[in-house]
Image (cartoon, rainbow, N blue to C red):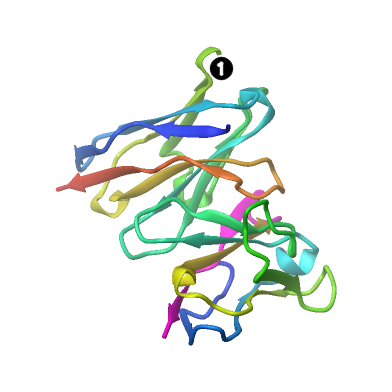
Amino acid sequence: QVQLAQSGAEVRKSGASVKVSCKTSGYNFVHYDINWVRQATGQGLQWMGWMNPGTGNTGFAQNFKGRVAMTTINSIATAYMELRNLTFEDTALYFCVRGRVLDPFDFWGQGTKVSVFS
Amino acid sequence: QPVLTQPPSVSAAPGQTVTISCTGTSSNLGAGYDVHWYQQLPETAPKLVIFGNKNRPSGVPDRFSGSKSGSRYARSASLVISGVQAEDESDYYCQSYDDRLDGSKIFGGGTRLTVL
């Protein structure tokens, strides 16, 4: 069965960076994009960007351009999202999600809590 | 500010029917892009309940249905839960694609369903 397993909770100081991993299984990793979606406490879902493991192509939401990087290591079917120059407003639950361009987000990771303090 | 507009909250007694709307613009729903719906319990990953405007994934009860108003180029869509049950109390989000925003995926602001 398809599974996306994310790394554990992180705590960072303002200005630092964080890198979250998403290990996938149960499907052909290079055939589907990996998206990243975040949710601040009590707030809605915010799409951050996507990466296609097969081509290496990426696309980012305007709010995150220049501050986020998405990478994969295809040999271990794992995706990574790095967010730089963190502020308190980046405190949120971060999800990796499988989904191609116009397709729905059909499988989600369990979420990684990132807390940023000043 | 979310690109898709949803009511912040709706409520219904068990057994009633509830409708959650999702309104977009000419660059997303009005451009013919599909809408998908997710159910989310607090602090858990969302679960897909409707995809491609009206299709239910395997395992989703048939009391969940979806539509785009009138045609595929309609700017609004709806999620309908017929015969609401206590276990349906959750947050619901619509999601689509916007070709004005560098191919961004977009979400509605979410609707909290309270079962009375």
Q: Could one spot residue B2 in this view of the protein?
A: no
Q: Quadrant of residue B17?
A: bottom right
Disc 1 marks a residue whose amino acid type is: Asn
Point 59% across, 69% down: residue: B4
Nearer to the camera, A61 or A113? A113
Q: Residue at x 24, y 52 (%)?
A: A88
* Magenta-tinted stretch: B98-116
x, y percent for residue B111: 49, 74
Task: Give the residue pinned by disc 1.
Answer: A74
Query: Relative to residue A55, is residue A117 depicted above or below?
Result: below
Residue in view at x 55 percent, y 67 percent: B108
Compare residues A25 and A98 and report the one nearer the observer. Answer: A25
The x and y percentages for residue B9 are: 46, 81
* Label 1: how many Cα within 10 Å (few below 14, some 14–19, many 20+): few
* Residue B20 makes an appearance in the image: yes
Depth order, front residue of B48/A66: B48
Q: Position of residue A11 (x, y in %)?
A: 20, 39
Q: Secondary structure at mark 1?
A: helix
Q: Is residue B18 magenta?
A: no
Farthest residue, direction right? B71
The question of residue B115 being in magenta is answered with: yes
Q: Give the quarter of the figure containing the N terminus of chain A.
A: top right
Residue A62's x, y, as percent? 52, 50
Judge whether A88 appears above or below B61 on screen.
above
Q: For this view, does B83 lie left or right of residue A71?
A: right
Work out whether A91 lies above or below B18: above
Find the residue positioned furthest to the top. Answer: A75
The answer for which chain carries disc 1 is A
Query: How many tags in the picture?
Result: 1
Q: Is residue A18 left or right of residue B95?
A: left
